[in-house]
Image: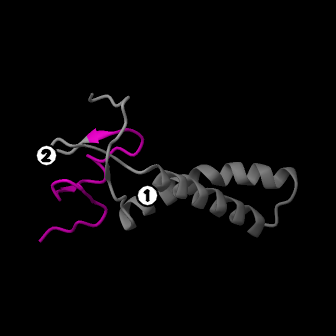
Amino acid sequence: MESNLGNSKCPKCGTYLDGVREVRYTQSFLCSICKTELEVPRYYRVVGVWISFSVSLLLSLALGLRGLGLLLGFIIFLFPSMFSIGFLQRKLIPPKLVVCRNDDSPFS
């Protein structure tokens, strides 16, 4: 039995799509089975960015950084936190895909 951890489900046909190889987080993509155009909801990315910003700020404050050091620490911690949060978010809480409603999609 194969684990579906980190995979998202097509809302049309119910097929699990690989969260690494098939799901595109910044643009629309086609389901590999039913060819429905799908996308990751915008809120999913926004939540990940806010969590990353918060983690970066908390790490900087926990080190006792203030002033210009706080800004520099925030920037230095931001990229590793974005990578880590993005990875964990995709594996632990994969996005619930929606049917694309864009008129400017690459598949139309």
Residue lying furthest right in this view? 67
Could you say which quadrant of the image residue 6 lies in?
bottom left
- What number is the disc on residue 87? 1
Residue 36 percent location from the top left of the image: 20, 43
Nearer to us of marks 1 and 2 is: 2
Please name the residue that numbered disc 2 is placed on.
34
Compared to residue 35, the image places residue 104 above or below, namely: above
Compared to residue 88, the image places residue 26 above or below, namely: above
Q: Earlier in the sequence, mark 1 or mark 2?
A: 2
Rendered residue at 30%/54% (across/down) = 19
Residue 63 percent location from the top left of the image: 76, 66
Question: What span is colored magenta in the figure?
Answer: 1-29
Residue 104 percent location from the top left of the image: 38, 28
Rendered residue at 77%/65% (across/down) = 61
Front residue of 33/83: it is: 33
Q: Main secondary structure of the magenta part?
A: loop
